[in-house]
Image (cartoon, rainbow, N blue to C red):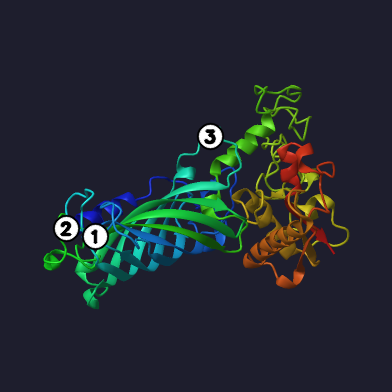
Amino acid sequence: MKLSLAIVALALAVPTVSYAQDSIAVVSTDEYPNTFSSGSANISPFTQKSKRFNDWAISFGAGVPLIQAGDLTSIKNGNGKNLFGYSAFVSIDKAITHAFGINLQYDRGETRQGWFNTKDSAPANATYQQVGARTQYDAISVLGDINFSNLLRRVDNKSTYRWALHGYAGVGTLAYRAYQKDATGQRLMTEIKPFKFGSFFGQAGAGLKFKVNRRLDLETRLMYVYTGDDEFDGGGAQYSEINKREDQISDNFFNATVGLSLKLGKHESHLMWHDPLQEIYYKLDVLANKNQDIEVCKKGDADNDGVCDDWDRQLDTPAGARVDGAGVALDTDLDGVIDLYDKCVTVPGPVENQGCPLEPTPTAPVGKIDDITTNMEGIEFDLNSDRILSTNTPILNNAVNYINSSNGTYTVIGATDTRASDEYNQKLSERRANSVKNYLIKNGVDSSKLNAVGRGEKDLKYPECDPATKCPEWKNRANRRVYFEAK
């Protein structure tokens, strides 16, 4: 019976979703994506450094255990008194995906069993044996945690995400001491020590969490504990001359608790509270209001590049030129010659030589450096992130070559859009600048040539985007950037 319970509990704990932290990160290579190589050269497995969310927490709480089925009294018998015990728990919680986690939990408590009826039914003349019992227990268990609110959340649900329904199931080891007391006094009836095969137990239940803030959650939880033991309540078959109820096989109990969860980590959001569908909602809202049908290309597509004029940052793209998502003609090597006219697409060269380097190879640049080369614009970031994207590596690899060939020093400047507070945006811009600086140093740039500063939301490429809701998303993304200045 106990082995079957363990198998069922573990089966319930298997995750049924595939949402997880980002599993793609940029890795340093000598090759960067071009016309003939895919971006896969710059992809590496997920690491701790590339996490976007916190996924550890410590939970603790207290509650009331209540015997549901036992030889003495219980709520199933419908009689007795002094039925309410006490309990406390602490757990270490690890989120595996947006909807599944694993908890290592320690419980300690005491159940109480009062008078019991000496007859199978309880008519008016029923007699009661004045025998009481209490059971002190300690338990260590591993629980699977399923976040049903994330698992079953609808695509069209745009409500504020602060309540979450969780389900728990798992197995562990149980140690206890059961005492019985009658008119002659109190005596120890049964003692079970932990980490024995016979001390395994299972528990399952549900909890409702409320997100107080980014660090703290409040939770109420109701668990059903299956002990698999007929002597847990201080009674059992061996005491049948005292206890007249032998129809119980296992003494089980409910445990109702109230607790707090402290979320650990440096990130703004915890993985279990991140709703991946909200990212889809935001992108859809850029296109249309929720009460309107999506109308494609309200202002047309003047340059016929496949990007509507509403979002096109270059309305006069030459015919036949490949463009990015913002309608800007691609310039892979950032030499000022778009790919359509560039005879050396992946190697920078002057305009007068159709984008190809002059022969012999030019020496380190001297004198004034033009803005197009030094700024190396286009290093943009996801919302609330300082992670370098694979699309940024061609620009950064070009920056490595350029800085190494020059005699000057450079300032790496980080910026943000206008969401969040000034203080938070300042720190985020500093992290972005340092992320790019560290990438350049890791790929061979002398650290003495670089300095990183953050300007927060004070250095907007599009100043009209304050607040951010006044602009389309491509402008806000352009504000979330890093660029270079030559000293």
Percent coordinates x, y for residue 465 in the rendering: 81, 42
> Of 205 and 131, which appears nearest the observer?
131
Q: Is residue 29 visible?
A: no
- Give the amino acid type for the residue marked by disc 1 in the picture: Phe
Q: At x 69% / y 67%, what residue is drawn?
A: 445
Lower sequence index among marks 2 and 3 = 3
Q: CA distance from mark 2 to mark 1?
A: 9 Å
| Callout in the foreground (2, 1) | 1
Contact, mark 2 vs mark 3 (Cβ under 8 Å): no
* Tag shown at residue 245: 2
Residue reaching furthest right? 368
Counting residues from the start of the chain, the first of labels 3 and 1 encountered is 1
Secondary element at tag 1 = strand
Residue 44 horizontal side relative to residue 438, left or right: left
Mark 3 or 1, closer to the camera: 1
Spatial CA span between label 2 and label 3:
53 Å
Lateral position of residue 375 relative to residue 219, left or right:
right
Q: Amino acid at mark 2?
A: Arg
Q: Secondary structure at mark 3?
A: loop
Tell me if mark 2 has few (under 14), some (14-19) or many (20+) residues whose alpha carbon lies within 10 angstroms of its own.
many
Q: Are marks 2 and 1 in contact (CB under 8 Å)?
A: yes
Task: Report the residue marked by disc 1.
Answer: 116
Q: Position of residue 463 (x, y in %)?
A: 84, 45
Residue found at x 66% / y 44%: 345
Q: Callout 3, which amino acid?
A: Val
Please give the label number shown on residue 155.
3
